[in-house]
Image: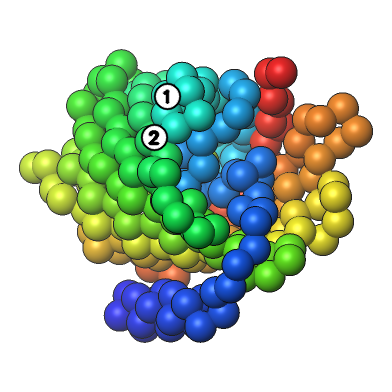
Amino acid sequence: MRTRNFLFIITLCFCGIKMLYAQSDTRDDVHLFQTFFRDATVAENPYGDATVGFSDFDGGKITHVGVRGAFPINPQFEIAGGIAFVNEDPDNGSGESGITDLRVTGRYHLVTQGQTNISIGGFLTLPIGKEDLAQGEANFGGFGALRHPVGPRTVITGVASLDFLKGTPAASGGWPLLSIGGDREAVLLIGGGVIHEVNSQINIIGELNLATKGDFSMLNGGIDYKMQSGNRLRGTLGIGFDDGAPDLAIVGSFLHEFK
């Protein structure tokens, strides 16, 4: 299953390359769901995002409520962070509740020629979370990401991230992505996505991500709705294809930009 998913991602990339031509809008105001921080955008203004999510795994259910946000230092660099409260309800045994580790991210937008946005960055988790939830670990990693318009209203995205993980540091990024215990492991995450503008208020977002550890691959589709106030209501539905991913995941959020 994982090999087929990997080949599917590569196929999407090649199809996207064939479609490339000059357009100016990379939809930087529209954020991804799975790779919220690992993206090729640097915001013009600070923003905050409140999230709530539900994930149904083979062995139980997880709900979370989180906050995350970013602050641009200059037009090329921003810092960001996220944390969540998680409730784990296994099918067998007692559940656990508590906070995740605090995820801190830095992202630098490379100045490039043409219409392709390219960013690089890294993250570190501060070990303040509950150990019974596989938290309390100082995880870290780095990534590269891109966005490129392939039509007047359509943008493709891509990301490659090498993370060194012990525990479950990704809950504050949207939903728990990996559940790794024991020794620290190197995890390669590869993903791609599409953002399509329906009109001035609605964007449709699709993403597919695959991790080399933790038996994780996941496809999600969502909507970003910009209200008259400028705030955004966002929601997505995800379907997992491996044991490490939720069978079904639902995440909603409210994003506010501070101008």
Q: Nearer the viewer, residue 201 or 127?
A: 201
Residue, x 50% and y 59% (percent of image)?
Answer: 114
Which residue type carries mark 2? Arg
3 left or right of 153?
Answer: left
Residue, x 32% and y 57% (percent of image)?
Answer: 160
Q: Nearer the viewer, residue 135 or 27?
A: 27
Q: Which image quarter is the C terminus in?
A: top right
255 left or right of 118?
Answer: right
- First of labels 1, 2 by sequence position: 1
The single residue placed furthest to the front in the displayed view is 113
132 left or right of 158?
Answer: left
The single residue placed furthest to the right in the displayed view is 228
Indicate whether 194 appears above or below 79: below
| Residue carrying label 1 | 79
Q: Nearer the viewer, residue 193 or 2?
A: 193
| Residue carrying label 2 | 107
Residue 208 place in picture, x, y as percent? 49, 65
Q: CA distance from mark 1 to mark 2?
A: 6 Å
Mark 2 surroundings: few (<14), some (14-19) or many (≥20) residues within 10 A: many
184 left or right of 4?
Answer: left
Q: Pointers 1 and 2 in contact (CB under 8 A)?
A: yes
Indicate whether 231 appears above or below 14: above
Residue 51 visible in the current orientation: yes
Residue, x 74% and y 63% (percent of image)?
Answer: 153
Q: Secondary structure at mark 2?
A: strand
Residue 84 visible in the current orientation: no
Indicate whether 9 appears above or below 27: below
Which residue type carries mark 1? Ile
For residue 63, which numbered disc appears in the image? none
Indicate whether 208 appears above or below 85: below
Residue, x 29% and y 27% (percent of image)?
Answer: 125
